[in-house]
Amino acid sequence: MLSLMRRGRRAFASILALSVVALSTAMASPVFAAGKTITAVMHSDLRIIDPIFTTAYITRDHGYMVYDTLIATDANFKIQPQMADWKISDDKLTYTFTLRDGLKWHDGTPVTAEDCVASLKRWAAVDGMGQQMMQFTASIEATDPKTITLKLKEPYGLVLESIGKPSSRVAFMMPKRLAETPPDKQIPEQIGSGPFKFVQGEFQPGVKAVYVKNTDYVPRKEPVSWTAGGKVVKVDRVEWITMPDSQTAVNALQSGDIDFMENPPWDLLPVLEGNPDLKVETLNKFGFQTLGRMNFLHPPFDNPKIRRAALLAISQKDVLDALVGNPKYYKVCGAFFICDTPFATDVGSETLVKGNGMAEAKKALAESGYDGTPVVIMAPGDVTTLKAQPIVAAQQLREAGFKVDLQATDWQTVVSRRASQKSPKEGGWNMFFTNWVSADVSNPIANLSIGGQGKKGGWFGWAEDAKIEKLKDDFVRAASLDDQKKIATEIQKEAYDQVIYIPLGQYLAPSAWRKSLTGVLDGPATPVFWNVDKSE
């Protein structure tokens, strides 16, 4: 893990200083059956298909198939033109984006600057980096059909990094009529300008999602690099097949019934690596952070003393051993902003990384006034990278003295239910677990779950912390990297004191595919399916 993380350390520093049914039924596809088809089992079933409505990575992945971005991030963490080029005024207060020629929505209408302005506003209303950028923004306007003009109240150095960030939430462009949908409601149809078209008529949540090549898409001429460059589609069709059982998916991959598996279980990797027809590789070299998030709106976790007791009860190593097992693929790390990066610190993480806090947890819970209110934990059983965390945490919380209601579900139910602010008795929740790609949590502005905006604009769990919000503002105004490091440390201290969330360590998640596929790309927002070819 360390060697893989260090391999990208210089690249990380550059960006951080500026600022993751049965097969026979599922594969029955009478429509668009001709041509080259890639069949893939992704890390999760796809149900929510609005990439601004949720931060779920499966929805982000869907977004990259259907939509495009104004600008994008390459493998050197540099921002590159995608749908648009840009200029910055000498006073650093005006950013002018000019759309390239030939951009069309999937319904055949041209992409306009008004579409993009509406898209930016919808994205910025809910994304952490977008929200921060808008605090410095005086206006975003379409000054002609191809020109988007963003004017700042004062210089802000993360405009391009915000609009071009590679992972959730991504600033995907969509037609104005869709982008004007309130961000807390899902858009009614999937019309993008990206390299694939979504086949609505074949979408079966829980079974499959289907994409076909957008023959009108004009790729950029630059070499492909992460989410930047030429998105050249080399196949006719991509099918995401839902297989909740990992062993079934592994068997299908080995037999050739599917072509790609995003997250095979770590314990089965040796079997896959021994198959001469398969390739196993970690596409996201910077890995993931896994975490637990509490609901600040309802008992018992509306009480910071009770949140603190829960934090003390949990051990990262126990979680990672159950989740991954092989230390080759995980790292105990108490840094909110990722170990081996400029903003890494161990402040506040001692019991979490040492796993020696249980006695203190029992004492803290006894003194907290906890009245036995059940802790409702959502436990998805259909995602390899999210099965272990709720089970281990539930055991540790019970040992500390909590009453726990562990509710088995699937991940897409979690994605929908975690957006509810209702009480647990009314179908709400107290705790859920998720994963972020490291790039999404690598600094206090990118890290959406570190925010303290509360019920309005906050991430699921709705932590309210004015001190963190003030420190984030100080961070973006800091004059030097050293000053940013000091502020990031203060933010982490406050985040541990108030238990904004519980970082549970870092891990790598290899993917596996048949060698008949070539051109599989790496990056922090993988897998993507442009550039991938398939030999028959």
Image (cartoon, rainbow, N blue to C red):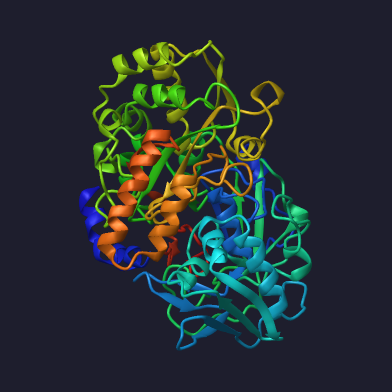
Q: How many marks?
A: 0
The front one of 253 and 86 is 86
Q: Residue at x 59, y 63 (%)?
A: 65
Q: Position of residue 213 (x, y in %)?
A: 64, 69
In this rendering, the answer to whether 132 lies above or below 111 is: above
Residues 492 and 13: in front is 492
Lateral position of residue 376 relative to residue 273, left or right: right
Residue 393 position, x and y percent, is 42, 24
Percent coordinates x, y for residue 414 in the rendering: 60, 35
**Which quarter of the figure has residue 10?**
bottom left
Q: Is residue 248 visible?
A: yes
In the displayed structure, does residue 52 sit left or right of residue 307?
right
Q: Work out whether 439 lies above or below 89.
A: above
- Residue sitting at 41 percent across and 40 percent down? 290
Asked if residue 440 shows in the view, the reply is no
Q: Percent position (x, y) of residue 221? A: 49, 85
